[in-house]
Image (cartoon, rainbow, N blue to C red):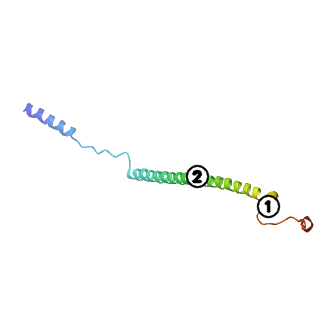
Amino acid sequence: MVARNIQEQQQSQVQTKTRIRHVRNPITLGEKAIIGMVAVLTFVVLGFMVNNFATLYSMNQEVYQLEQTISNQQQVNEGLSLQVVELSAPDRILHIASEQLGMSLDDNKVKVVQN
């Protein structure tokens, strides 16, 4: 009988130990939703920032290329203006007129026009 009492006491102790506890989750469903929305919003903002930086980089490259094109065109224009100055020299015009075209300069027939 004593053995039976001891055995019952052990079983009751085992039964009390196997009691199931319900532990609540420390993070609620609403908090999870808020965290998810913040994460999505962060990725969207980062995506816009990366897109903006990529656009700025491509625009800067285009500006640099246009500046190079402008610089090259300015050099061409300076060279052409030097050619204009060389080709419009009065001595050269007189030389071509008399040698190639057979013209002569008569000072009596020359009229000076002023603007």
The type of residue carrying mark 2 is: Asn
Location of mark 1 (residue) = 93
Classify residue 104 by image quadrant: bottom right
Secondary structure beneath dot 2 equals helix
The type of residue carrying mark 1 is: Ile
Location of mark 2 (residue) = 60
Q: Kindly indicate whether the residue at mark 1 contacts the one at mark 2 (C-beta within 8 angstroms).
A: no
* Mark 2 neighbour class, 10 Å CA radius: few under 14, some 14 to 19, many 20 or more: few
Q: Quadrant of the C terminus?
A: bottom right
Q: Where is residue 101 in the image (x, y as percent from the top left)?
A: 77, 66
Secondary structure beneath dot 1 equals helix
Q: Residue at x 18, y 36 (%)?
A: 13
Which residue is most to the top? Answer: 2
Q: Residue at x 38, y 52 (%)?
A: 29
In the image, residue 110 sits, relative to residue 73, either above or below, namely below
In the image, residue 16 sits, relative to residue 89, either above or below, namely above
In the image, residue 82 sits, relative to residue 7, either above or below, namely below
Q: Where is residue 74 in the image (x, y as percent from the top left)?
A: 68, 54
Q: Position of residue 57 (x, y in %)?
A: 55, 51
- Gap in Å between the C-alphas at discs 2 and 1? 48 Å
Q: Residue at x 49, y 51 (%)?
A: 46
Q: Quadrant of the N terminus?
A: top left
- 58 left or right, relative to 107: left
